[in-house]
């Protein structure tokens, strides 16, 4: 892992299997993230990101590793003009994002008593890159909503930008 990786760890009162489902099942990911993934979750398989009917497919958007209840890794999504417009990214920021190399995210799931330790590692980031700045804000909010969903049954409201 390089020093330009973003790492976030939290503890969630759930099981490894329930956490895996929350990371992979469209009905759950849509609740706390607003994204559903179309894939079979096998290493090497393509992933299509569906955000409110806006589908992003790219041959380099793939599952890197998938061990149910233990580990999940995939390449980060492709930035498109339609995505940037939908999430209110200005044209200059979008141009910087599109120029950066593709990054990846890994979810490590480790039992911890009656909880699970979830470590999210988003790496292969450009030093001082725009993506690094965005994930540094985005992952804590997203994982907090995931944790709330698993522990209370309710995701958090979307954090205003």
Image (cartoon, rainbow, N blue to C red):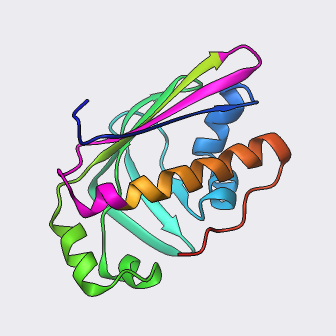
For the point 17% across and 50% down, the residue is 127
In the figure, residue 57 lies in which quadrant? bottom left
Q: What is the quadrant of the N terminus in the image?
A: top left
Above or below, 34 against 146 in this view is below
* Magenta extent: 112-133
In the rendered view, tell whether residue 22 sits above or below residue 33.
above
The answer to whether 59 appears left or right of 116 in the picture is: left
72 magenta-colored: no
Q: Quadrant of residue 42?
A: top left
Residue 65 percent location from the top left of the image: 39, 30
Nearest to the observer: residue 123 or residue 67: 123
Furthest-top residue in view?
A: 113
Q: Nearer the viewer, residue 133 or 64?
A: 133
- The x and y percentages for residue 10 are 59, 34
Image location of residue 43, percent across then percent down: 37, 33
Front-lying residue, 72 or 130: 130
**130 is within the stretch colored magenta:** yes
Residue at image x 43%, y 83%? 88
Please tell me whether residue 45 is drawn above or below residue 118 in the rendered image: below
Position of 137 with respect to 155 (left or right) is left
Picture residue at 66% right of the left edge, 38% below the top: 21
Instruction: Give the x, y percent position of residue 154.
Output: 81, 55
């Amino acid at each position: 892992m390089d020093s330009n990786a973003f790492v976030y760890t939290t503890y969630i009162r759930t099981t490894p299997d329930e956490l895996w489902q929350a990371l992979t099942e469209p009905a759950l990911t849509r609740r706390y993230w607003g994204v559903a993934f179309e894939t079979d979750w096998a290493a090497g398989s393509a992933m299509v990101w569906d955000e409110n009917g806006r589908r992003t497919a790219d041959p380099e958007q793939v599952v890197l590793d998938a061990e149910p209840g233990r580990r999940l890794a995939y390449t980060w999504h492709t930035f498109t003009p339609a995505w940037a417009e939908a999430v209110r990214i200005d044209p200059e920021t979008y141009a910087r994002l599109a120029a950066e190399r593709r990054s990846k995210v890994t979810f490590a799931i480790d039992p911890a008593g009656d909880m699970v330790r979830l470590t999210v590692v988003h790496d292969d980031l450009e030093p001082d890159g725009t993506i690094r700045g965005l994930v540094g804000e985005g992952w804590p909010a997203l994982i907090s909503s995931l944790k709330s969903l698993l522990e209370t049954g309710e995701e958090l409201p979307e954090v205003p930008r």
